[in-house]
């Protein structure tokens, strides 16, 4: 039986003039997302120290969340914790790129 | 204690003129990577049916692998299964973008 996990990857580019405190606020906001119940796998990362032409290191943070299915992802999108994160932290980023994909 | 998981995300853009058989060969190659022992989390996905301006759906496949640490990732890079995948399947893609990141 093939699973149909839903992978939601978000790369954030933070504004370049943030203070350390603002960056910590952003990180705290990201970490708050972990408590959303429908998440089955979670990670927050910053670019690794790997350097090859195919590697994009231009983003500031990579948020990785996985859900059992698309319904789990929808619960996350509308969850108060997620809405609060966007409301409080959107001031910190200048660009966001999302890669949503489902298992094959 | 903070973990330092190593997340290795690879987005592949396949050539546009592949046959179904070639695409299946590519998928089979991707799936073979799952057997590399140092992988702690693994997924292969294709773009989900979500549509917002921030969502990039231009890639063909997203490979998600996670390792306990950078050493686990290095084992993967040099593993015969991975080298064989690259050798056999590089003919199928026209572009690859990698996001390597470590847990914060």
Image: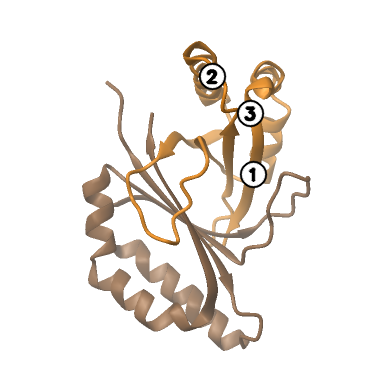
Chain colours: A orange, B brown
* Front label number (3 vs 2): 3
Q: Which mark is residue A93?
A: 3
Q: Residue at x 46, y 46 (%)?
A: A57
Decide: few, some or many residues near mark 2? Use Cα within 10 Å; few <14, some 14-19, many ≥20.
Answer: some
Q: Which residue is mark 1?
A: A97
Task: Tell me which corner region of the image, top left, top right, bottom left or bottom right, holds residue A104.
Answer: bottom right
Q: Residue at x 36, y 66 (%)?
A: B33
Q: Residue at x 26, y 42 (%)?
A: B69
Disc 3, SS? strand
Mark 1 chain: A
Can residue A51 be spotted in the picture?
yes
**Relative height, residue A81 to residue B78 (above, below):** above
* Front label number (1 vs 3): 3
Decide: few, some or many residues near mark 1? Use Cα within 10 Å; few <14, some 14-19, many ≥20.
Answer: some
Mark 2 chain: A
Q: What is the CA distance from the residue labelled 3 to the residue labelled 2?
A: 17 Å
Q: Give percent across and percent down for residue B80.
A: 24, 72
Q: Which mark is residue A64?
A: none
* Front label number (2 vs 1): 1
Mark 3 chain: A
* Left or right for A84, reference A39: right
Please check whether the numbered discs 2 and 1 fall on a single chain: yes
Nearer to me, B11 or A40 = B11
Q: Which residue is mark 2?
A: A32
């Amino acid at each position: 039986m093939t699973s149909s996990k839903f992978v939601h990857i978000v790369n954030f580019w933070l504004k370049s003039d943030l203070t350390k405190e603002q960056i910590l606020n952003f990180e705290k906001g990201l970490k708050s997302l972990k408590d959303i119940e429908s998440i089955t796998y979670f990670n927050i990362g910053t670019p690794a120290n790997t350097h090859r032409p195919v590697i994009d290191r231009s983003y500031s943070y990579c948020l990785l969340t996985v859900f059992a299915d698309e319904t789990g992802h929808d619960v996350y999108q509308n969850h108060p914790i997620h809405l609060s994160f966007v409301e409080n932290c959107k001031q910190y980023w200048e660009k966001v790129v999302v890669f949503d994909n489902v298992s094959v």
